[in-house]
Image (cartoon, grey):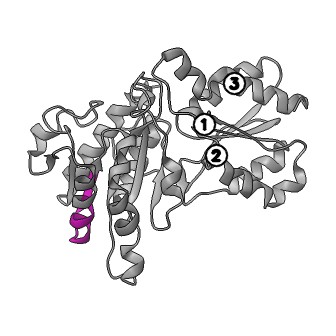
Amino acid sequence: MPELRELTYAEALREGLRQLMEEDERVFLIGEDIGVYGGAFGVTAGLIEQFGAERVIDTPISEAGIAGACIGAALTGMRPIGEIQFMDFVTLSMEQLVLQAAKVRFMFGGKASVPMVLRMPGGSGTGAAAQHSESLENWFVHVPGLKVVMPSTPYDAKGLLRASVQDNNPVIFVEHKLLYKTKGHVPEEPYIVPLSQSKVVREGAHLTVVATSIMVNRALQAAEELAKEGIELEVIDPRTLKPLDDAPIIESVKKTGRALVVHEAVEMGGFGGEIVARIAASEAFDYLEAPIRRLAGLDIPIPYNRELEYHAVPQVESIVREARKLVKGEY
C-alpha cells in the first residue's frame, strides 16, 4: 500500500493557492509582504516568482486598502484572495467588510456579488502578545452576508480554500498560527471540501465535544487520554462557522447526552454560545443528562509572558478536566 502524501498546513494552503491561480487568471493575491518575503508565515513563498508582481501584489501597510481592493476587484469579476498579516489587524478593515462587502449583493438585489476571500492567521501560542494573538472570528459570524471558515487540518485547509474562492460571497478564512507546521494527508490533485459541512472527526459514546481550529487537535489529544479511563469523546469540527451545519452536532448530543464546546476566543460573545443555544433549542435538549458546558479563553488580552499566555486559553489538560467532570457528573 503506497504511503499517504503529507504536507504541512502552510504547504497545503500554498499548493491550493498555486493550483487556483494556474487554473483561473481571475485569481490573484494581495497583501503585505506576501510577494518577495513570502508572507509573515511563509504561506505565499515562491508564488511571486511563478506568477509575477501583477498577480502577487505587495501592498503598503493598509488593511483597509487590502480589503477595499479585494471588494473592488471582486465587483468587476475578479477572484481576489487578500491576506491580513495578523487577524488583529482586520480591525482596520471593518468598514470595508461589514458595510460594503457583506451588503452589496443584498442591496443590489443579487445583480452584483463580491467573490473574495480574506485570509488571516489568528490565535495565540507564539509569544506575540496582545496585539498579535486574538481570535476575532465571531465578529464576522455576527454579520449577515459574510461566510466564516476555520480549517483545522492541512486536508481541510486546501479543500476549504478552493470552496471559498469558488463561492460568490465574501469569505473570512481563519488560519491558526500554530497549525501552519502541523502535517497531514493532502492529495496532490485539486479537490473541494464543501462549505457548511461539519465533520465528526472522532466517534464516541459519552460526551460530544464541539471544537474549532486548533482546539480540534487538542480535543483529539484529550480524547486519547480519556480513552485510557474508559471515557469516549465524540469530537466534531464545524469547519465552517457560518453558515453552520448543526445537524451532526444535534445528532451527536442525542447519542451522548452531554456536550462541551471548546474554542480559543473569549467566552463572552464567543462562538460557543451559538452552539449551546442551537443544542438547547433542538430536540437534543430532551436527551441531555448534564448541563451544556463551554470552555473558552479567559476574558483578558493575551499576555506576552509565555506561561500566562498558555493558561489564558484552553489546553489539552483543561479539556480533559472539564470532560471528565461532565461524564462523571461532578459539575
Mark 2: which amino acid?
Met
Distance of label 2 from label 1 (alpha carbons):
7 Å
Q: Residue at x 59, y 40 (%)?
A: 266
> Which residue corresponds to mark 2?
268
274 or 249: nearer the eye? 274
Residue 194 visible in the shown view: no
Where is residue 77? Give x, y as percent: 22, 69
Q: Are marks 3 and 1 in contact (CB under 8 Å)?
A: no
Q: Is residue 73 magenta?
A: yes
Mark 3: which amino acid?
Ser
Left/right placement of residue 186 relative to residue 306 reads left
Q: Are marks 2 and 3 in contact (CB under 8 Å)?
A: no
Distance of label 2 from label 3 (alpha carbons):
18 Å
Q: Residue at x 59, y 48 (%)?
A: 238
Left/right placement of residue 74 relative to residue 205 reads left
Is 78 drawn above or below residue 131 in the view shown? Answer: below
Where is residue 71? Give x, y as percent: 27, 64
Helix, strand or loop status at disc 3: helix
Where is residue 233? Give x, y as percent: 75, 32
> Which residue corresponds to mark 3?
318
Tell me the magenta residue range.
70-81
Q: Are marks 2 and 1 in contact (CB under 8 Å)?
A: yes
Q: To which quarter of the image does residue 25 belong?
A: bottom left
Q: Which mark is residue 142?
A: none
> Which residue corresponds to mark 1?
299
Is 95 drawn above or below residue 304 in the view shown? Answer: below
6 or 83: nearer the eye? 83
